[in-house]
Amino acid sequence: MRTLLLPLIALSLFGADWPQFRGPNGSGLCPSCGQLPATFGPGENVVWKTGLPAGKSSPVLVGDRILLTASEGDELITICLSRATGKVEWRRSVRAPLRESQHKLNHRAAPTPVSDGKSVYAFFADFGLVAYDLDGNERWQVRLGPFNSQHGVVASPVYADGRVVLVLDQDTDAYIVAVDAETGKVAWKLPRNVINGYSTPIVHRPASGPAQIIAPGSYQLTAYSVVDGEIVWFARGLTCQPKSAPTIAGDVLYFSGWTSGNDAGQQVDLPPFAEVIAAADANGDGKLSPDELPKPWQPTGSWRAVDLDRDGFMNEREWTFFRTRRAARNAAMAIRLGGTGDVTASHVLWRYERALPDVPSPLVYNGVVFLVKNGGIATSLDAETGKVLKQGRLTGALEDYYASPIGVDGKVYVASEHGKVVVLRAAGDWEILAVNDFGSDIYATPAIDDGKMYVRTMDALYAIGSSN
């Protein structure tokens, strides 16, 4: 009897799990997590603090354990800590066989691991997938890569119905893959007609039929059956490089996508490839060099961003993606779930196209959509209509944001790049309740459980809770 009671005792002590990026199904919410303080920091309302190697993955919570990743040199590390004390219970690592090219804001340990309650599955772009049980015993490895991504592959894995699913969007040979969680064998793998993207997918469980993996990509959001990868539905109208993760509230999916050069009014109508070749291909090789392309048709950024296969020229596929990019529009959008095929005209409920986040995902809390834009601009939208309820500056934290907002206890918590955690009253007419400074950069999204929040800075993990 005592053995049977232990799991129940653990659940009562530690509350709900937070098993993936942004918690239960990526919602960023914990309705039953009790009260959290509005004011805290390195010297206030700290339950415990544990130093960590560098990493940008977010913590996940499983039973009495906290799991996250880090790196030191070529060592790619998975760490397990006690949820109660912060003590490191185990640390396991694999060595990186390669070094992927990355943006300076990316990191070798940026993707957040996912757990099914029995094991933890960690993805490193420099290695692939590795699975450990909760006692730290390695179960399997799946080597992946190398990748051809402008800023480095960074999407986190998700888990559904016995499968670990990864979206590996890159400039050439992008794909989505499902791996059997028990064996590490590939269950299915499908190509994606996209370029570099950085968005973690979400799991949707319709009223009937198998679970769906909903994955943002270049210009399109696509839902795949978790059973065999079959495309169930898709919606067009996304931006070029999605970075935010989608979220679901009721029967509606919310997503926000932003790419430089795609704000309203910045669109450019470029001619089709055949017309460009006829006008500009001086040597007749069927490709375009930087010298051949007339100035009005030149990319506004680097040539590398449009030269997807890195051969120094632009071919028809590359021009088509570039042309589509110049015509794309950034937007936050709401899509009613339940469709099949192309649902762009039938299921897109609204679009909002201003003051959009670059990386932070939308938070939908009590019928309000919260968005946080770089520079510390917060916007609340009516979740049903997309109407702006309030927009204002996060005074005291006017900087960039890479962590996503979370909601609990009638408050919204969002961490800025340089370590200021802003607390808002969770309402359409939100107000700032506190700005808490950790004095160290924050890129990870906090995790929450009953009465505690776990905040990862670049050098430590804090458990925050009321001193009372």
Image: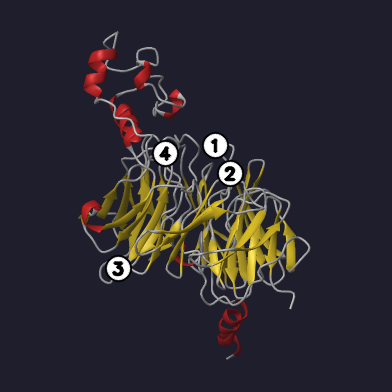
- Residue pointed to by mark 4: 196
SS of the residue at dot 4?
Answer: loop
SS of the residue at dot 1?
Answer: loop
Front-most of 441 and 382? 382
Residue at 44%, 49% in the rendered image: 199
Instruction: Say which quadrant the N terminus sits in.
Output: bottom right
**Amino acid at dot 3:** Pro
SS of the residue at dot 2?
Answer: loop
- Count neighbours of disc 2 (C-alpha within 10 A) and say few if under 14, some if 14 to 19, many if 20 or more: many
Q: Residue 405's x, y, as percent?
A: 54, 59
Q: Residue 45's x, y, as percent?
A: 74, 69
Q: Does any portion of residue 348 appear in the rendered image?
A: yes
Q: Quadrant of residue 296?
A: top left
User: How many numbered circles does the render carry?
Assistant: 4
**Residue at mark 4 to residue at mark 3: CA–CA distance:** 29 Å
**Residue at mark 4 to residue at mark 1: CA–CA distance:** 12 Å
- Residue pointed to by mark 1: 102
Contact flag, marks 3 and 1 (Cβ < 8 Å) = no
Residue at 42%, 25% in the rendered image: 310
**Residue at mark 2 to residue at mark 1: CA–CA distance:** 8 Å
- Count neighbours of disc 4 (C-alpha within 10 A) and say few if under 14, some if 14 to 19, many if 20 or more: many
Relative height, residue 318 to residue 453 (above, below)? above
Q: Residue furthest right?
A: 43
Q: Nearer the viewer, mark 2 or mark 1?
A: 1
Contact flag, marks 2 and 4 (Cβ < 8 Å) = no
Mark seen at residue 216: none
Front-most of 202 and 116? 202
- Residue pointed to by mark 2: 108
**Amino acid at dot 1:** Gln
First of labels 3, 2 by sequence position: 2
Contact flag, marks 2 and 1 (Cβ < 8 Å) = yes
